[in-house]
């Protein structure tokens, strides 16, 4: 299976998994919270939880 990105065929395996994306959003949410941007942080942390429901630790570091 392939996906088209920037007019190039790329293997679907090269795309990050949902868990990897959730971890990135969790990190971004934590960084935003550390900057005092709590509403934005909560949006990213909620996305992380929505994608990776089996890992409810997204709010642990905040």
Image: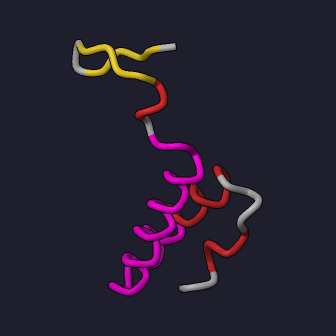
**Residue visible at 43% across and 81% down in the picture:** 33
Q: Is residue 29 above or below residue 50?
A: below
Q: Is residue 35 magenta?
A: yes
**Residue visible at 54% across and 43% down in the picture:** 17
Q: Main secondary structure of the magenta part?
A: helix
Q: Is residue 53 magenta?
A: no
**Residue visible at 55% across and 85% down in the picture:** 61
**Residue visible at 77% across and 60% down in the picture:** 54
Q: Which is nearer the eye, 29 or 3?
A: 3
In-image side of 61 versus 40 (left or right): right
Of all residues shown, which one is farthest toward the right? Answer: 54
Task: From the top left corner, tell me how far across and down residue 59 is, in percent.
Answer: 62, 78
**Residues drawn in magenta:** 16-42
Q: Which is nearer the eye, 20 or 56?
A: 20
Q: What colour scheme governs how the chains and residues are painted in the rendered image of this protein?
A: secondary structure
In-image side of 5 versus 33 (left or right): left
Task: From the top left corner, tell me how far across and down residue 5 is, in percent.
Answer: 30, 21
Task: From the top left corner, tell me how far across and down residue 7 is, in percent.
Answer: 23, 12
């Amino acid at each position: 299976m392939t996906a088209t990105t920037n007019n190039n065929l790329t293997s679907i395996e090269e795309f990050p998994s949902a868990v990897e994306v959730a971890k990135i959003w969790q990190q971004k949410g934590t960084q935003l919270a550390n900057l005092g941007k709590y509403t934005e942080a909560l949006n990213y942390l909620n996305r992380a939880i929505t994608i990776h429901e089996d890992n409810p630790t997204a709010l642990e570091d905040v």
